[in-house]
Image (cartoon, rainbow, N blue to C red):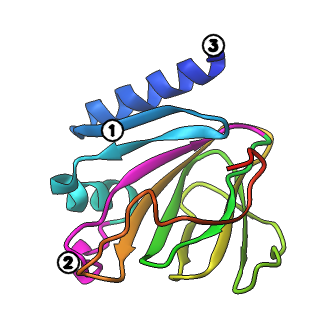
Amino acid sequence: MSTEKKEIFDRVEGMLQAQGFTIAAKDDTRPWGGFFVIDETQAQDFANQYFDGIDVENLRIGGKLSPKILIVAPEARLSWQYHHRRAEIWQVVEGTVGIKRSNTDEEGELAEYKPKDQIKLQQGERHRLIGLSGWGIVAEIWQHTDASNPSDEDDIVRVQDDFGR
């Protein structure tokens, strides 16, 4: 892992701990960056911190919200993807990131988002998070759309992926 990547992961981990969050999982091995998963019981605290206090009870369908922090490296792209069992809400925390969206398999135009910008992605909507000139940090909450079969990391349909996944 590059020194720069290690430094940003250490900084974000320290920030989350200072905010009182319990990190349920950490993955700094993704080729595009990685993520932190926050303990589910802290979903409302996470929403208060990163989503201006959005009421998580209004978002709950499957009983879980899977709060996460995504870290995307400069000039890296997550897969062009969609999900069958969740919608997502993203809010930019640090940096400027690019996002492409579309309701078809053809990628939409690149739009730039800055800190405090919020993006709501519908179930089935194609999307791709893109690192621009610097590191981007994005808070994410999943809105599970099938209570009997909540979404998970396997609920990713990759239309295109730079890393051959």
According to the image, label 2 marks what residue? Answer: 57
Q: Which mark is residue 25?
A: 1
**Residue designated by label 3:** 3
Rounded to the nearest angstrom, the CA distance separating label 3 from label 1 is 21 Å
Secondary structure under the numbered disc 2 in the rendered image:
helix
The residue shown at (46%, 35%) is 27
Marks 2 and 3 close (CB-CB < 8 Å) = no
The residue positioned 58% from the left and 54% from the top of the image is: 115
Count residues near mark 1 (Cα–Cα under 10 Å), then give few for <14, some for 14-19, many for 20+: few
Labels 2 and 1: the sequence-earlier one: 1
Instruction: Identify the magenta region.
Output: 53-74
Mark 2 to mark 1: distance in Å?
23 Å
Which label lies toward us, 2 or 1? Answer: 1
Name the residue type under label 3. Thr
Q: Position of residue 31 (x, y in %)?
A: 66, 36
Residue 2 screen position, x and y as percent: 66, 16
Q: Residue at x 74, y 48 (%)?
A: 164
> What's the amino acid at mark 2?
Glu
